[in-house]
């Protein structure tokens, strides 16, 4: 269920054509690595464009990647402004998980 206020605010950042194509919720992949860094990844081009507008990110022209990397302060801002529009999906790097041993054997 999406909050009406969030949908209305989001709508001010997207065109009619983009609104037709945008799928909600927007999923942000976060890698749960052992070092404790928190970096989010948005893989969709349209989703990345919308997030750049929401966060007022000015990307260089040569950086037209479909992927967008987000850092902890940016993730916090998105989640505090749009708690129902964005979903965090935690991923685990298989290589990192091989080095971790469960305390319960």
Image (cartoon, rainbow, N blue to C red):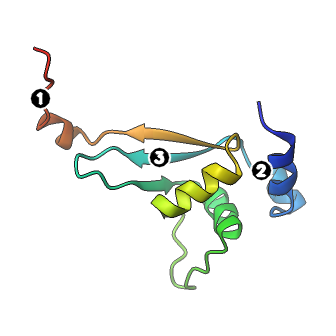
What secondary structure is marked by label 2? helix
Residue 29's disc number: 3
Q: Which residue in the protein does label 2 denote?
A: 21
User: What distance separates the C-alpha of mark 1 from that of mark 3?
Assistant: 24 Å
Q: Is residue 30 left or right of residue 81?
A: left
Q: Which quadrant of the figure has residue 61?
A: bottom right
| For discs 3 and 2, the disc positioned in front in the rendered view | 3
Q: Which quadrant of the figure has residue 105?
A: top left
What secondary structure is marked by label 3? strand
What secondary structure is marked by label 1? loop
Q: Is residue 66 above or below residue 22?
A: below
Pointers 3 and 2 in contact (CB under 8 A)?
no
Along the polypeptide, which appears first: circle 3 or circle 2? 2
**Can residue 15 be seen?**
yes
Q: Nearer the viewer, residue 25 or 6?
A: 6
Q: Which residue in the protein does label 1 denote?
A: 101
User: What distance separates the C-alpha of mark 2 from that of mark 1?
Assistant: 43 Å
Residue at screen point 77% across, 50% down: 21
**Can residue 67 be seen?**
no
| For discs 2 and 1, the disc positioned in front in the rendered view | 1
Residue at screen point 81% across, 39% down: 3
How many C-alpha atoms fall within 10 Å of the one at disc 2: few (<14), some, or many (≥20)? few
Residue at screen point 65% across, 62% down: 51
């Amino acid at each position: 269920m999406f909050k009406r206020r969030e949908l209305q605010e989001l709508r001010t950042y997207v065109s009619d054509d983009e609104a037709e194509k945008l799928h909600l919720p927007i999923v942000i992949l976060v890698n749960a690595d052992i070092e404790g860094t928190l970096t989010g990844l948005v893989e969709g081009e349209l989703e990345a464009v919308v997030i750049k507008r929401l966060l007022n990110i000015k990307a260089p022209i040569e950086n037209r990647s479909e992927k967008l990397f987000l850092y902890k302060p940016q993730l916090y801002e998105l989640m505090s402004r749009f708690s129902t529009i964005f979903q965090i999906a935690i991923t685990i790097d298989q290589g990192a998980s091989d080095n971790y041993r469960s305390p319960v054997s």
